[in-house]
């Protein structure tokens, strides 16, 4: 690179005044002496002036309001819990340690079983795609009573209810829209109308509700709703989503893929079951061996001995809510103060709610629906040019 | 004359930085009105920059909103080593770049259509800043057709070049600020800007000659 090229390289910085004084002087002298360099300098200056004269784009008037609304909402959702103190802190640590221990036991049991039992082909009659949630939550009454691991299964069903990431059925709905916020509002309205509420947190963990959803922003222009509800609720939600999608000028194939013509919700439940079956067939390697005629591994037998068996059943029977004093109509209940009775009643309602969730999972009634809202700038103007939508109604394995 | 205007611009920037520091502190403490003031101050600039990177207006709105929300989310991580607005621009620029990579190149749409912005508080607050950035109204005297041609030429630049050109020539940042936003060295900014202008000169030869 000769001296002229070096000067040429510095012309942009020269017109921006971003060179040192000595460099400015050197370039200035070179430009004065060289007409070609001077012409080049002028053309670069003209380019800069063109760029500078572009009209500034103004943000829309309601942008600030929507930002602040969104900020308030996300703050409410992500509000940090107050710092725990004293006994509560220790209780939390203990609870976390207990959860980790349980998770480790379950993981070890699954690994051990998979390791000791040779892989068998999945059977057609099984429901639920993959994951311990399905296998352990399968709540056949005869199996429950006859097998020593029945109580353990029941317990795992409760664990599965509090860890919904492994809940059984999965269905996906992708919506491509030009107005993300409006569709968000519509989706949340539909969920609320079907008694599917946002998952809330309590001090002691996730609140047990029968049907709930998590909303998360995956990226700019992509919002996902993860819904846990019964098949009927999910069917109703998907049915009500039809007009929303139609408003967004979805292609006809999209509407067909949602089976919007299936007006009967129970018919739709069959679709969900098909989804599960498809998922089973797709992911046989990860499917648990719920119905494999095999001998349980020694580790699992130890676990069942710990959780199941006569002692555990007796303990469960003795801790049954109905047999507790204060909840019946006997003289003990009458002698309790009103506040205590109210508290007991509240606790009973909570236990029943949790039991309902557990039953839903155990009976394989609770399913997962993923609604993903994707921003598409051309959704309104040119629906035909949108790429094909591959993820509609697609059964997917666990995450 | 140019030196005086630069000094005035630098002084005003210093004042803004000072205000930003107080607003950021208040936002950290949970004062949403302080955050609202920050949004009002910078929404036009961020939107302007993002809309040059992603010309579709609705996308630009989404990305601008996302940038502010992300800034709020991470405001605890802002240590004040850089200026707030360069930090904010960096967030917005990264979002715009990743969005472009995701959706691929898209055809240019005009951003020069008149907007129906209401006279909100945000407008009034940012109008002064916009006027400060472009004190000469004659600069706005550019035809819609010319603006479209310039934007189309910008659109054809590589992402790195485009960002540098937008930050320097559209947003009026100096090289150090551009380096802060892009995370590149000052020398890299200088060479990228020069190369970008050379490319634009070729693409806009007819306009450059006319002018």
Image (tube, coloured by chain):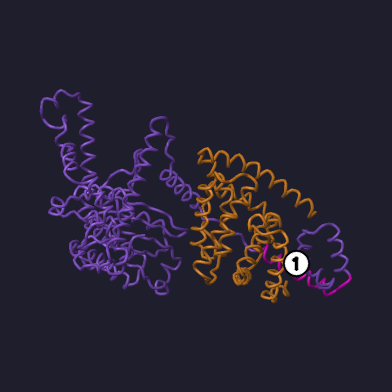
Rendered hue of chain B is orange
**Height in image: B30 above or below B142?**
above
Q: Quadrant of the C terminus of chain A?
A: bottom left
Majority secondary structure of magenta residues: helix
Residue A8 horizontal/vertical position (percent): 79, 70
Residue B47 horizontal/vertical position (percent): 56, 57
Residue B148, image quadrant: bottom right
Q: Nearer the viewer, residue B24 or A226?
A: A226
Residue B95 horizontal/vertical position (percent): 54, 59
Rendered hue of chain A is purple
**Height in image: B128 above or below A175?**
above
Q: Nearer the viewer, residue A98 or A13?
A: A98
Looking at the image, the residue that sits furthest to the left is A330
Query: Which residue is drawn at the image coordinates 53% and 67% (left, top)?
Result: B101
Q: In the image, is A230 to the left or to the right of A73? A: left
Asked if the stretch drawn in magenta spans residue B161, the answer is: no
Looking at the image, the residue that sits furthest to the front is A298
Callout 1: SS:
helix
Q: Chain of mark 1?
A: A
**How many labels were placed on the picture?**
1
Q: Which residue is mark 1?
A: A45
Q: In the image, is B1 to the left or to the right of A288? A: right
Q: In the image, is A370 to the left or to the right of B178? A: left
Query: Which residue is drawn at the image coordinates 64% and 57% (left, top)?
Result: B183
Query: Which residue is drawn at the image coordinates 33% and 52% (left, top)?
Result: A213
Q: Quadrant of the N terminus of chain A?
A: bottom right
Q: Residues within 10 Å of mark 1 (few under 14, many from 20)?
A: many
Residue B79 horizontal/vertical position (percent): 61, 44
**What residue span does the magenta drawing correspond to?**
A33-53
Residue B158, image quadrant: bottom right
């Amino acid at each position: 690179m000769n001296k002229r090229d070096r000067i040429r390289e510095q012309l942009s910085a020269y017109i921006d005044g971003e060179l040192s004084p000595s460099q400015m002087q050197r370039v200035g002298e070179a430009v004065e002496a060289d007409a070609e360099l001077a012409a080049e300098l002028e053309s670069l200056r003209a380019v800069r002036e063109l760029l500078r004269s572009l009209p500034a784009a103004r943000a829309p008037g309601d942008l600030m309001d929507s930002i602040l609304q969104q900020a308030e909402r996300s703050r409410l959702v992500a509000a940090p819990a107050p710092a725990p103190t004293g006994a509560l802190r220790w209780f939390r640590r203990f609870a976390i340690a207990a959860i980790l221990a349980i998770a480790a036991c379950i993981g070890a049991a699954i690994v051990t079983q998979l390791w000791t039992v040779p892989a068998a082909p999945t059977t057609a009659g099984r429901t639920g795609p993959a994951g311990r949630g399905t296998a352990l939550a399968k709540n056949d009454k005869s199996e429950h009573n006859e097998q020593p691991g029945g109580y353990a299964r029941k317990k795992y069903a409760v664990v599965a209810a509090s860890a919904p990431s492994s809940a059984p059925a999965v269905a996906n709905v992708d919506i491509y829209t030009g107005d993300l916020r409006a569709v968000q509002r519509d989706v949340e309205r539909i969920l609320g109308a079907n008694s599917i509420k946002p998952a809330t947190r309590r001090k002691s963990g996730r609140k047990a509700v029968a049907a709930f959803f998590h909303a998360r922003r995956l990226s700019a222009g992509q919002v996902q709703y993860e819904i846990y509800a019964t098949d009927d609720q999910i069917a109703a939600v998907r049915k009500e989503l039809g007009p929303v999608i139609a408003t967004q000028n979805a292609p006809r194939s999209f509407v067909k893929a949602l089976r919007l013509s299936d007006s009967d919700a129970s018919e739709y439940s069959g679709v969900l079951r098909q989804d599960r079956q498809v998922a089973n067939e797709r992911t046989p390697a990860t499917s648990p061996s719920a119905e494999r005629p095999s001998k349980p591994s020694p580790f699992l037998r130890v676990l069942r001995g710990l959780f199941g068996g006569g002692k555990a059943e007796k303990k469960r029977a003795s801790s049954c809510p109905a047999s507790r004093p204060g909840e019946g109509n006997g003289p003990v209940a009458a002698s309790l103060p009103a506040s205590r009775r109210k508290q007991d009643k509240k606790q009973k309602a909570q236990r029943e709610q949790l039991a309902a969730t557990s039953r839903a999972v155990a009976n394989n009634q609770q399913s997962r629906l993923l609604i993903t809202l994707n921003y598409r700038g051309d959704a309104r103007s040119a629906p035909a040019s949108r790429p094909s939508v591959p993820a509609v109604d697609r059964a997917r394995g666990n995450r | 004359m140019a030196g005086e205007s630069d000094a005035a611009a630098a002084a005003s920037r210093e004042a803004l930085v000072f205000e930003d520091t107080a607003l950021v502190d208040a936002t950290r403490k949970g004062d949403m009105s302080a955050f609202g003031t920050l949004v009002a101050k910078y929404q036009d600039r961020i939107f302007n920059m993002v809309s040059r990177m992603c010309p579709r207006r609705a996308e630009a709105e989404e990305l601008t909103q996302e940038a502010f929300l992300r800034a709020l989310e991470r405001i605890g991580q802002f240590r004040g080593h850089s200026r707030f607005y360069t930090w904010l621009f960096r967030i917005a620029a990264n979002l715009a770049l990743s969005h472009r990579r995701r959706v691929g190149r898209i055809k240019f749409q005009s951003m020069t259509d008149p907007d129906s912005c209401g006279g909100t508080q945000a407008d009034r607050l940012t109008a002064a800043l916009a006027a400060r950035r472009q004190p000469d109204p004659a600069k706005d005297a550019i035809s819609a057709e010319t603006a479209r041609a310039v934007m189309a030429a910008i659109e054809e630049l590589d992402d790195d070049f485009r960002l540098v050109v937008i930050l320097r020539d559209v947003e009026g940042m100096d090289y150090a600020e551009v380096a802060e936003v892009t995370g590149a060295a000052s020398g890299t900014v200088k060479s990228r800007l020069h190369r970008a202008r050379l490319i634009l000169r070729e693409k806009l030869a007819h306009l450059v000659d006319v002018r």
